[in-house]
Image (spheres, rainbow, N blue to C red):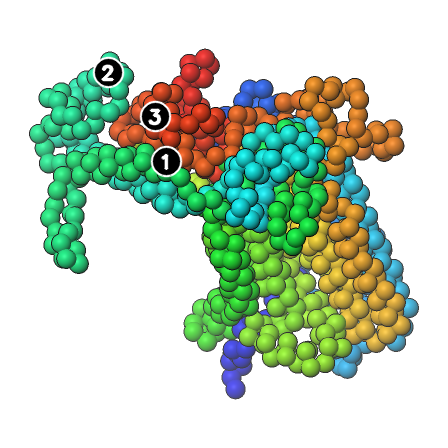
Amino acid sequence: MAKNDCNYRDAIKAPSANKKDLEVQLVLSLILGISALLAFCVLRPRWPSLYSARKRRLDSSVSLPALPRSFLGWIPKLYRVTEDQILDSAGLDAFVFLAFFKMATRLFMTMAFFAIVVLWPINSHYRNFQPALGGGHELPERGNGHDGGDDDISDHSFLWAYVVFTYFFAGLTLYSVNWETFRIVKLRQKYLGSQSTVTDRTFRLTGISPRMRSEAKLKSLIERLDIGLVESVTLCRHWKDLDALVGHRDKILRRLEAAWARYLKQQQSQSPTRSRRDSSRQVNNDEESGDNTQLLISEPNQPHVAAGDRPLVTIRYGPLKLRSRKVDAIDYYEERLRIMDQQVSEARKKKYEPTDMALVTMDSVASCQMAIQARIDPRPGRLLTKLSPSPSDLVWKNTYSPRGIRRLKSWAITLFITVLTLIWIFPTAIIASWLSICTIKRVLPAFAHWLSLHPIIHSLFQNGGPTLVVSLLNVAVPYLYDWLSNHQGMMSQGDVELSVISKNFFFTFFNTFFVFAVSRTGFEFWSVLRDMLKDTSKIPAAIAADVEELSIFYINFIMLQGIGLMPFRILEVGSVFLLPIYRMMSSTPRDFVELQKPPVFQYGFYLPTALLVFNLCLIYSVLRWGFAILVFGSVYFLLGYFTFKYMVLYAMDQPQHATGGAWRIICYRIVIGLVVFEVVMVGQIASLSAFVQSLAVVPVIPFTIWYSYYFKQRFEPLTRYIALRAIKKSGVAADGEQAVDEASDDDSEPRPPRGVMRRGSTLDEFKEKDLVFVNPSLVVPLPQPWIYEDPPPQPSPDEEGTETNGSSQPQPALILPHADRSLGIGDDNVWADNRGRDAR
């Protein structure tokens, strides 16, 4: 076989452990990161609508300092934003997310210190490990114990240092997690206990028997429990037809607006002067009449009767829709919209069959928490109480979906995602193989020879290719999992967000670490896994054999993710490149206003990669290259803290009701990483024929597993519910009577700001003011066609009452589904109350 021939099964192997490779990857990451940071510093003051979108839309009462417009002056100002200000302006979810990055930075800096001061000299002396950069020579590889490699040693006493630091690093990690959990739980209880939103006073009641499906009966039942008074009961009903009508009407409305936009654009190109004159005359007529119901009335001064070709639409009719003809698009869609308005109005007056779910709002948070944390009915599956999402976060179409259908969809999508994650090994391996030196030698031998003459570019292909593939997959796959999670039948977008975090972590950890740790190549994974299942005692040694050889790959990965790609996140490259495309696709005023909305910060897109890096730092912390991974891991989390701090505070929205539920997922995934770290250390030490030291590591594994059960019993309930003693009654001063005995708490723990603890001052209370649990399809005014620059007038209260069923039911604040109603678009917010706008 020729020297340049390659085994296809080895197309994806660990990058060469060459000193030059780390230098090249570091320089490349620095070039990418610094260029992105400089671009952001230049564009930030020029594009405030993108990079300061959230800050511009925040209420002035929110205590978030404005950042200077200077080139680098915003960095010290961002650093000085305190945790109190984060909690006050961004909510509990953002606080928990950033607290994880701070904890990881402190932890890995401490571990890096010991790895450099203690473990590096030990490895250098006993294992001939010399990782000094420069020279381009091959780094010493771990031998197999049979060929006289550097690990073929007789003195195993130094391996007790591995045992000690395995215990030390595992204990330090659990201590950090435990300390941070105490702090977050305490702050969470104070934060949520100080507010009284409609969400905090509402619980979901499921498993309602057919004879109890009445608002009056449910109210009487709950009040007979003597846990408090019921403020309102919303019995979920089969609103599928109504929701479908409203959704179809929205499509017709947008088609009508698009038809008007095409026509007006054509008129402006034919006669700009006449078009502007007619548009001005039409606006004046609308203002004078004060009525937006004249769409179908033809008058000589309206632009839709001006000379010119009007847009046409093809309609099909007859048997099997075989016949067709072209009609005026504007007239057709206006008539369709008029018919849809009548159908929606009639559908809103109908009585719909109730489901087995209701939303019960109590008069106090304490009453709601007592109902949630207790069993109401002794029969299994009857009258189950659960936490309720916020009105804007609730997915109403899933409230009337049968429980069996939702469960079936959940199981089917979970199974599909599991299978997809497993089979994703092969496209990952194939794509990465295209960038390997093996493939280049086989397909382009001349180019491969040129690469051999240029070691820097050769290193980019050899090491940067697989790293780039893994990084891009970590960016692309979450979008697929987010789409699948939204079709899983969950009740709220908050539940979808937590589900996306779990799914994406499973994908990234399995495909980025476990597959390559087991086989080093995606092609060999199944055969190696089958051999290990036949003899499970080989699992630690098999994993340890390949884990250390992948050290350079994961150093490059963390380096690229942190130094190279983290600044691109704050630059919002996706939004910058997609904005011109979206603008070209937009034609109506409504489309352009929707482009002004800031992107939504989705924790499921960012947290899984951070958890993967966290676990990689743990797994490699005691190994020979552990000091480098810990150093770059500290840099990753330090840069990530500043990057995401800017994004959640100034650039992106977070519409969900903040509960800090992501902390549970973070802690459980850290425990998984610790268990893998300990198993790797057992196999690593055993591979050096030090069986006594290997057995000495084993006891820490059950202790770590026990901690997960300890966390579940002690902390998890406090991350889901609000303790009754933490709830402050309305009207009681925060510095007066305290439900929790502060004297027994550690004074070193930070306390929430007095402004946050004041009644009515939390972000969630501000966002959910005047909201009630009502399906928007029942009460939200039907939007009128938006044809010109100014938005159409909102229906008056009398018109709103005639459109609905005429009941005296309180009207909710008008919100977009899954939107943050506290963060408008300034004067361009078409859903804002006109009276409130005038008052400002």
Nearer to me, 582 or 296: 296
Q: Amino acid at mark 3?
A: Thr
Determine the residue positioned at 79% across, 25% down.
738
Q: Dot 2, crowdedness within 10 Å: few (<14), some or many (≥20)?
A: few
| Quadrant of res 447 | bottom left
Give the residue drawn at x 17%, y 19%.
277
Marks 2 and 1, the one that precedes in the sequence: 2
Q: Secondary structure at mark 2?
A: helix
| Residue, disc 2 | 289
- In this picture, residue 739 sits left or right of residue 276: right
Q: In which quadrant of the rendered view does residue 248 lie?
A: top left
Extreme residue in the left direction? 307
Q: Disc 1 to disc 3, how far (Cα)?
A: 11 Å
Report helix, strand or loop for mark 1: helix
Q: Is residue 177 left or right of residue 607?
A: right
The three-letter amino acid code for the residue at tag 2 is Ser
Residue designated by label 3: 802
Q: Position of residue 160 (x, y in %)?
A: 89, 65
Q: Quadrant of residue 657?
A: top right
Secondary structure at numbered mark 3: helix
Relative side of 399 to 703, left or right: left
41 and 652: which is toward the camera: 652
CB atoms at circles 2 and 1 under 8 Å apart? no
What residue would you read off at disc 1?
348
Local packing at callout 3 (Cα closer than 10 Å; few below 14, some 14-19, many 20+) is: few
Residue found at x 11% / y 27%: 306
- The picture places residue 414, in percent across and down from the top left corner, at 54, 61
Instruction: Give the mark nearest the N terminus, 1 or 3.
Output: 1
